[in-house]
Image (cartoon, rainbow, N blue to C red):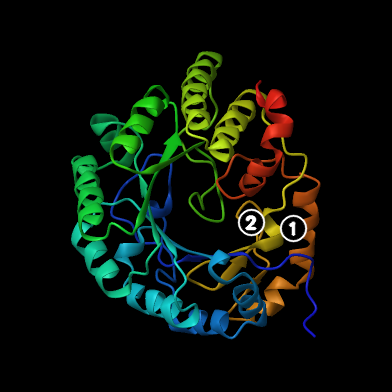
Amino acid sequence: MLERPPGRLRSLNLVSTLRCNLRCMMCDIWKTKYEHLDMEDSVLQKIGCSDVVKDGYKTLGKDFNISVTGGEPFLSENLESVLSFIKETFPGNPYTITTNGTLTDKIIRAFSKFGVKGSRLHVSIDGMKDTHDLHRGMPGSFNKTMKTIKAVRKHFPWVRLKMKFTITKENLGEITDAYELSRQMGMEFGAKPVEVAIHYTNPGGKPGFGTSFSGPDRLVISEQLKKVASDCLRRGESANAAFFLDTIRYINKGRTIMDTCLSPLGTAFVMPNGDVFRCLHFNSVGNLAEGSFDDAWTSRTSMSVIESARKMDCGGCASFHGSYGNYADMFLHSIKNIFP
């Protein structure tokens, strides 16, 4: 019987490429030279042979979360292999792709060939036209992204669309504008503060783009997120409301309401070079060029990450993963404590 730390794999995140066509203020991926830009077939094969992965999928079925990200995944020279792997290894399972949305034709082709009913497309939009283009470092990117959203909605109405908004000093006044746009476009909405991930988007360390907010900044963010949370509550979306309200707490107090983080118990991020992470704020727990996925999942480093996250030694974060899944359960019991 396979021995492993507590927690069944529930979420498999494949970083398909580190290529990107934008020059985002808050991300250093485009500045960095990597030996492995695209996820290779050998990495996919190691994942497919994993008893941990098979057990998670067999037990959870369509609740087993599969996500493809980058870089910009639609720039990956091996994206077809990644999507073929998902379709063959997890037949019928919907999956999520996170994109900047600028490569309309490639996105339409991918969903035409590999689309699965119920799959999700998460699209990064960081404000209205001028602000978004400034953020993303490419004039015209907003219009290209909007074109993609409309095309996906037209050709693939079964794809679940979500707008992902990264809060920075440059766009904090446009959270509600973006939220209203998402509703108009029939999209779900997520917003979180910019963060530094030295094992992922900021391999050089802290980016020059500031991640701390002044008192007036925090006030603006708080007011905007309260409006978003209020509308979510009105729509019966309690988990979303709780997340936005707890983000207010995090921005103002540096901690979320959660006293523990269970994310590493069931989450794996796999990089193009085969590095495996349970959380991107901790070191890699193994590498698929040196061992199996199950070796990484059961390693001593893996256990250490779980314990550190349980104790919140990391200080906590306001990531979309983390304790997000717990908000629905705790909401009615804790909402009065969420406000800063």
Q: What percent of the width, then of the height, locates residue 274?
A: 54, 73
- The C terminus appears in which quarter of the rendering? top right
Corner quadrant of residue 76: bottom left
Corner quadrant of residue 283: bottom right
Q: Which residue is mark 1?
A: 305
Tag 1: Cα neighbours inside 10 Å, few (<14), some, or many (≥20)? many
Kindly give the residue lying farthest to the top in the view shown: 216
Q: What percent of the width, then of the height, locates residue 245?
A: 59, 29
**Mark found first going from the N terminus, 1 or 2:** 2
**Residue type for callout 1:** Val
Q: What percent of the width, then of the height, locates residue 112?
A: 25, 70
Q: Which residue is mark 2?
A: 279
SS of the residue at dot 1? helix
**Residue type for callout 2:** Cys
Q: Would residue 78 be found to the left or right of residue 247 on screen?
A: left
SS of the residue at dot 2? loop
Q: Is residue 256 visible?
A: no
